[in-house]
Amino acid sequence: MGLSNGINDPNKKQSLIADCVTLIDDQVNAKGGLSGLGLKAAYAAVKSIKPGYITSAIERLLPEVLVALDPMWNEGIQTGDPVRYLIENRSRTADVLLGITDAKIEKSSNGVVRGAYKKLRNSAKNDVEEAVPGLAKIIDNYAKR
């Protein structure tokens, strides 16, 4: 049974999405310094200009994310602790996650979005790596249900 099979229940899926939104909100709020201020401002602008965008984006990406993480999760199960495995392999986990957005950006017809993404891509990896422990715990919570 793959990770994506675990969210077939619509109520479970909505809770999982809500937990992921909270994780992103917390990660953004924890950022400090000038780059943190810029990130917080951009995030707030996206949320105010297009309410529900973050939730919608997670809902669209979640099936691909779970399919992409499934092999690593299974490797972690073989070690006895999939959460610890994703955390210990956070760079690889981040690459898997960013690979999904990389592919979507490459298909985008919006050159401005592509250009902005490419400028932020390297720093985004660090941000995603920082979020891996929280994401791994969220996934584990829903995989156990």
Image (cartoon, rainbow, N blue to C red):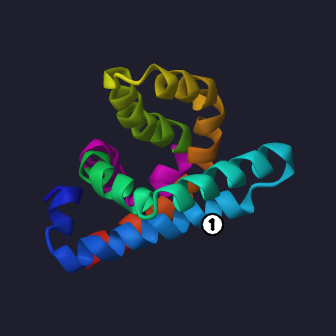
- Relative vertical location of residue 31 with respect to residue 17 in this rendering, above or below: above
In the rendered image, the quadrant that contains the N terminus is bottom left
Q: Main secondary structure of the magenta part?
A: helix
The image quarter in which residue 31 lies: bottom right
From which residue to which does the magenta span run?
Answer: 67-89
- Identify which residue is drawn at 27% across, 49% down: 70
- Identify which residue is drawn at 44% across, 58% down: 54
Residue 108 position in % (x across, y down): 35, 25
Q: Which residue is mark 1?
A: 26
In the rendered image, the quadrant that contains the C terminus is bottom left
Q: Judge left or right: residue 5 versus residue 85.
A: left
Query: Quick check: can you spot residue 81?
Result: no
Residue 41 position in % (x across, y down): 70, 53
- Identify which residue is drawn at 58% across, 45% down: 129
- Relative vertical location of residue 120 with respect to residue 76 in this rendering, above or below: above
Is residue 102 or residue 113 the one in the foreground? 113
- Relative vertical location of residue 96 with respect to residue 24 in this rendering, above or below: above
Residue 141 position in % (x across, y down): 37, 74
Q: Judge left or right: residue 138 versus residue 44.
A: left
- Relative vertical location of residue 79 with respect to residue 10 in this rendering, above or below: above
Q: How many marks?
A: 1
Q: Is residue 104 magenta?
A: no
Badge 1 amino acid: Asp
The image quarter in which residue 53 lies: bottom left
